[in-house]
Image (tube, grey):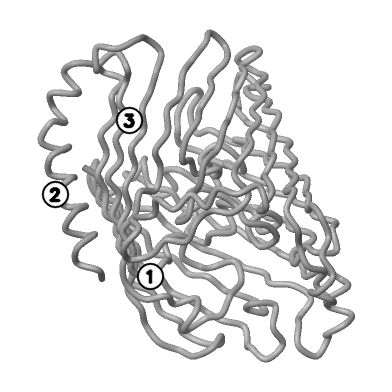
Amino acid sequence: MNAKPLLSLILLGMVLLANARHLRAQESTNVIDASITQDVASNLAGGIQTGQAQLGLINLDFSLASESMELWSNGMLRIHIQNTYGQKPTEKLVGDAQVFSNIENGNSTYLYQFWYSHRFGRLTVLAGKHDLNETFFTSELAGEYINSSFGIMPVASLNVPVSIFPATTLGLVGQYEFSDQLGLVAGIYNGLPGEITGSNFGIDLNLSGHHGYMYIGELHLRQLSRVLNGTYKLGGFYHSGQFGKLTQPSIKRKGASGLYFLADQMIYRETPGGSQGLGTFVQLGYAPDKTSLNDKYAALGLNYTGLIPGRPDDQAGVALAHASLNEALLAAESSTFAPCETVIEFTYKHKLTESLVLQPDIQYIIHPGMKTHLNNAWTGLFRIQWTY
């Protein structure tokens, strides 16, 4: 781990946390979060090789209301710093394309997000260094899982450069709420996030029109039932950069696009209005371009809150994510590539205290990396998450 950036992170965190109570006293809309996520992972069978790895993520996250800084109303400044550390088990042990731990990044300290948002009635506008995945492709139920595929669909992350963890870049996002049930959000991002190095603190925005731009939009439908709440999202994206054809990389094509759909739906509640019960999520993605490595994606999951008596906040879940390989590439190199990579994940989130969560997790990965030479893998993971 690089000592200088980590020391800077710790010192900055100490200063900001020292002022946390003062900021909270000024304005209740201020949010000051510090968290540590630690994964102990094992590849039990298959993949590249069996073995163990440890990896972690430190977050220092500050959302400061403009009123608390004695400025104008309806504004919010976000400063989000991260440190990742440890091994890379996907790269060294499993070889999966969808990455079975969503915090894997090696050893880096960097400015993750730095943006300002302002609300104008029903319209909210955000500008700055922003993680696209905090606004787009989000599913509350799918977000409980550890495999990264449930967070950001591979029809985007495997096909085009995207401003997501850990490397983000400048974006401009607008969100308009027509009503409590209907909303529209759209954004434009720089086409290629800059590389995070040991010395640049992740502030290389890599601004250049040559990389193209990422355009994305979503339509949101919410609360269609008063009894069992649900959220439905229909989205699409277009990246205006140049991409090589999969079977002939020297042949460049302008632009790559995709469509997607997400749904979170409660299907059973133990008591009316209660939080305990069964919910389901669905994710569907389609990227038809000849440059898209993953052309079709589908995921389905079931989450139960309060499955074990006496543990009303614990969550148990099982989910499946299926990412298919572009048919043209498969036909050209059938001896090298498998038709898909499929993940089945079993997870349980045990809320030990208000600030401490323990999460054992098992994943079965079929055709890791969509490669024929890698056997199906069994991974075991134990996550500890502490939040200030």
Q: CA distance from mark 3 to mark 2?
A: 18 Å
**Element at label 3:** strand
In this picture, residue 92 sits left or right of residue 2: right
Q: CA distance from mark 3 to mark 1?
A: 26 Å
- The residue type indicated by label 1 comes to Gly
Q: Position of residue 252 (x, y in %)?
A: 82, 65
**Element at label 1:** loop
Q: Nearer the viewer, mark 2 or mark 1?
A: 2
- The residue type indicated by label 2 comes to Leu
Q: Quadrant of residue 72?
A: top left
Question: Number of marks in the image?
Answer: 3
Residue that mark 2 sits on: 11
Q: Position of residue 268 (x, y in %)?
A: 58, 36
For the point 45% across and 28% down, the residue is 274
Q: Position of residue 221 (x, y in %)?
A: 68, 25
Q: Position of residue 264 (x, y in %)?
A: 62, 38
- The residue type indicated by label 3 comes to Ser
Residue that mark 1 sits on: 106
